[in-house]
Image (cartoon, grey):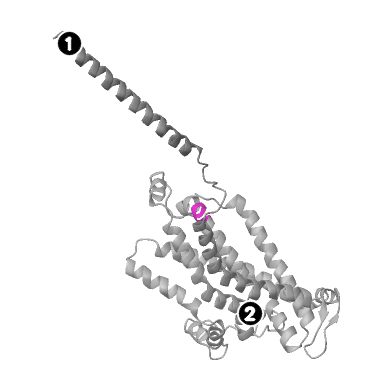
Amino acid sequence: MTTNTQANTQADTQANTQADTQADTQADTQAPRVRKRRATPAADPSRPSARNRSTRLLAALFLAPTIVGIVVFTVVPIAGSVVLSLFHWNVIDDPSFAGTANYREVFSDSTVLVSFRNTLVFMVLAVALQLLIALALALAVNGRMPMWLRSVFRSAFFFPLVLSAASISVVMKYLFNQDFGVVNWLLGLVGIAPVPWLTSENGAMATVILVYVWQQFGFSFLLFVGGLNNIPKEIHEAASLDGATGLRKHLAVTLPLLSPTLLVASVVGIINALQVFEQPYVLTDGGPGDSTRTVVMVIYETAFEQLRFGPASAVGVLLFVLIMAVTALQFRLSRRFVHYQ
């Protein structure tokens, strides 16, 4: 019995010793692997991978046509106009350097000065009326109205914008004719004498503004409809609970929340109004006198009718500076009056 017990004890001791030896051997064998894994350097996040490079290349390929188009059709013509404004050129003879003579001629030309005054007056009246009508119609359409009827009004109000301004002006010229126009015929039904829409200075400017606003307000209308849909209904409900209803609610709640959309609509509207051409050119040809002559009309007449491309380019450069100044002023004022959610 004693001999067997000793044998078993020796066997267990040997087994334990062998197991410990094997475990130590395996640990020593795996230890270098762990150290090797830890020693492996991490990937540099600042170094672009192959996938990122391919993504950037694909984005550049998609953006290339737009960038090329902007450079070719916007940047190059602007730079060419600035250079051409420093020369005398009539297409037939070789260009001759004029320096600032074209700009001095522009500032001393009464027609050019009157055109800038007319354009500024037109811009203020047309944009104000356009935004007011578009906002009022957007609030009306966004009220309690069936969805199908909203779609009908949206399409009807936007439809004039897709039409040609020249074709619309031709039709409107007949409608506002003093002798046989439909507008004066309708006014005669209620006892109003014929109005000289296109032959008096105030009437001509009013007609040009009305035709322009009728065609352009659809764009601002869609912007306002989208902006009103983005305003949470809970805000209007809370304002109603606080007693704000009707005009007070729109002035205190709707307009501040709609101010970013109003900024976009005003910037686009002012830029388009400063470049108005088709409506006054077709309706009144700048008359009577120079009462409806705009800056773009002066550029067209000076360049393509008188072949004086130097002064025409100088007027174009001044108009570009005016547009940039007015736009910069709008964005500067937006820091105070525009509120983002």
Residue 313 in percent (x, y) is at 75, 77
Is 23 left, or right, of 79 in this rendering?
A: left
Q: Earlier in the sequence, mark 1 or mark 2?
A: 1
Task: Tell me the quarter of the picture where residue 275 sits.
Answer: bottom right
Local packing at callout 2 (Cα closer than 10 Å; few below 14, some 14-19, many 20+) is many
As drawn, 211 above or below 336? below
Q: Which residues are magenta?
A: 255-259
Can residue 96 be seen from the camera position used here? yes
Residue 256 part of the magenta-drawn span: yes
Please name the amino acid that badge 1 sits on.
Thr
Residue indicated by mark 1: 3
Q: Residue at x 70, y 70 (%)?
A: 320
Q: Determine whether, in the image, residue 290 is placed left or right of residue 233.
A: right
Q: Which residue occupies the extreme front position in the image?
A: 3
- Residue at 51% x, 57% y is 50
- Residue tagged 2: 277
- Circle 1 sits in a helix, a strand or a loop, which is it? helix
Magenta residue check for 229? no
